[in-house]
């Protein structure tokens, strides 16, 4: 079970309250997309789920268990960022296996996982290359491969495609969705691209100023936006 629950989750940086009590349940295997204006707290919400920031109120649960105080490495979460810093001096294979080496996974198991991930991501022929020998899309795939090899329960994506050109973005959307359908990993994905949200999400969560304005399927939000803010964001004619 990899349901994720935010339960009146709050976060303040000093006097600045960034998340004002977020309640959201993400179902096992669901692909949820967070949208909202810059600064509304999307990255902070992901970072708290990953354990990179501490909540200042409320609870966060993974698989029904509170993760407050649980270290990032014990949360079974993998995160893919927009700046997918690969290690330049390591090959594709070494980049993908790095976290497994840190976790002291047996070499045979690590090699098998790297091989499986590489074939899923069409990187099988590139395992001995270095990052500088790869295209932008291939590098982004290596970054995803690094996350996949850890076999996480939950995938977090923070604007993973915003550094790619338009054509590659369209292709990578389809690849990420195909990967999700194959792995069925609970996924939370942040984007400011409406098309990305409408085409990829099982459910879209529209945030604004530290609160959730509305959560629903793309069609629900398009047909019945709760207010003008959501309508404006989704681009529906309300
Ligand atoms: P988003 O990802 O939606 O653009 P963020 O979650 O990055 O927004 O940031 C939300 C707010 O929290 C912003 O006002 C940002 O300046 C503030 N913030 C984020 N991280 C920190 C931090 N480490 N210290 C102080 N303020 C922060
Ligand atoms: Mg952000």
Image (cartoon, rainbow, N blue to C red):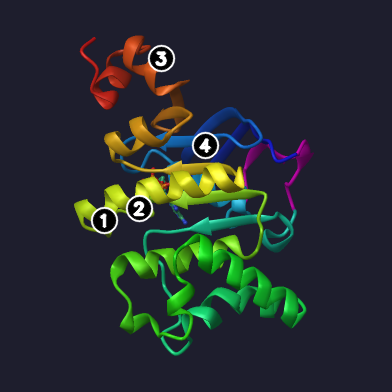
Alpha carbon distance from label 2 to label 4: 15 Å
Residue 17: image x %, image y %? 48, 38
Residue projecting furthest to the bottom:
89
Residue sitting at 38 percent across and 11 percent down? Answer: 226
Q: Is tag 4's residue or tag 1's residue first in the polypeptide sequence?
A: 4
Q: Which mark is residue 194?
A: none
Mark earlier in primary sequence (3, 1): 1
Residue 172, numbered circle: 2
Q: Tag 1's secondary structure?
A: helix
* Closer-to-camera residue (11/189): 189
| Residue 94 seen in render | yes
Q: Mark 2 touching mark 1, by CB under 8 A?
A: yes
Label ID, residue 168: 1
C-alpha span from label 2 to label 3: 25 Å
Q: Nearer the viewer, residue 136 or 206?
A: 136
Dot 4: element: strand
Q: Mark 2 falls on what kind of element?
A: helix
Label 1: how many residues lie within 10 Å, few (<14), some (14-19) or many (20+)?
A: few
Tag 3's secondary structure? helix
- Res 220 label: 3
The earlier-in-sequence mark between 2 and 3 is 2
Q: CA distance from mark 4 to mark 1?
A: 21 Å
- What is the quadrant of the C terminus in the image? top left
Magenta extent: 54-69
The reply to whether the C-beta atoms of the residues labelled 4 and 1 are less than 8 Å apart is no
Q: Position of residue 89 (x, y in %)?
A: 44, 90
Please give the label number shown on residue 31. 4
Marks 2 and 3: which is nearer the front?
2
Determine whether, in the image, residue 64 is placed left or right of residue 224. right
- Relative image position of residue 91 (x, y in whole percent): 47, 85
Does ligand 2 reach within 8 Å of label 1's beta carbon? no
Quick one: label 2, few (<14), some, or many (20+) residues within 10 Å? Answer: some
């Amino acid at each position: 079970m990899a349901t994720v629950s935010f339960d009146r989750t709050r976060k303040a940086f000093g006097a600045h309250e960034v998340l004002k009590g977020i309640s959201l349940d993400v179902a096992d295997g669901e692909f949820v997309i967070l949208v909202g204006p810059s600064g509304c707290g999307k990255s902070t919400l992901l970072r708290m789920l990953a354990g990179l920031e501490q909540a200042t109120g409320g609870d966060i649960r993974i698989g029904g268990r509170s993760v407050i105080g649980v270290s990032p490495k014990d949360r079974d979460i993998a995160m893919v960022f927009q700046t997918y810093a690969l290690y330049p001096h390591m090959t594709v294979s070494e980049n993908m296996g790095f976290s497994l080496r840190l976790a002291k996974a047996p070499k045979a198991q690590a090699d098998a996982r790297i091989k499986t991930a590489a074939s899923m991501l069409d990187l099988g022929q590139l395992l001995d290359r270095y990052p500088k020998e790869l295209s932008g899309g291939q590098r982004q795939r290596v970054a995803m491969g690094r996350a996949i090899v850890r076999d996480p329960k939950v995938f977090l994506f923070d604007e993973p495609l915003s550094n790619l050109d338009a054509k590659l973005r369209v292709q990578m959307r389809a690849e990420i969705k195909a990967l999700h359908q194959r792995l069925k990993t609970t996924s939370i994905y942040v984007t400011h691209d409406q098309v990305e949200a409408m085409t990829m999400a099982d459910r879209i969560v529209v945030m604004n100023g530290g609160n959730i304005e509305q959560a629903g399927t793309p069609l629900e939000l398009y047909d019945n936006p709760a207010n003008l803010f959501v309508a404006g964001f989704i681009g529906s004619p309300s």
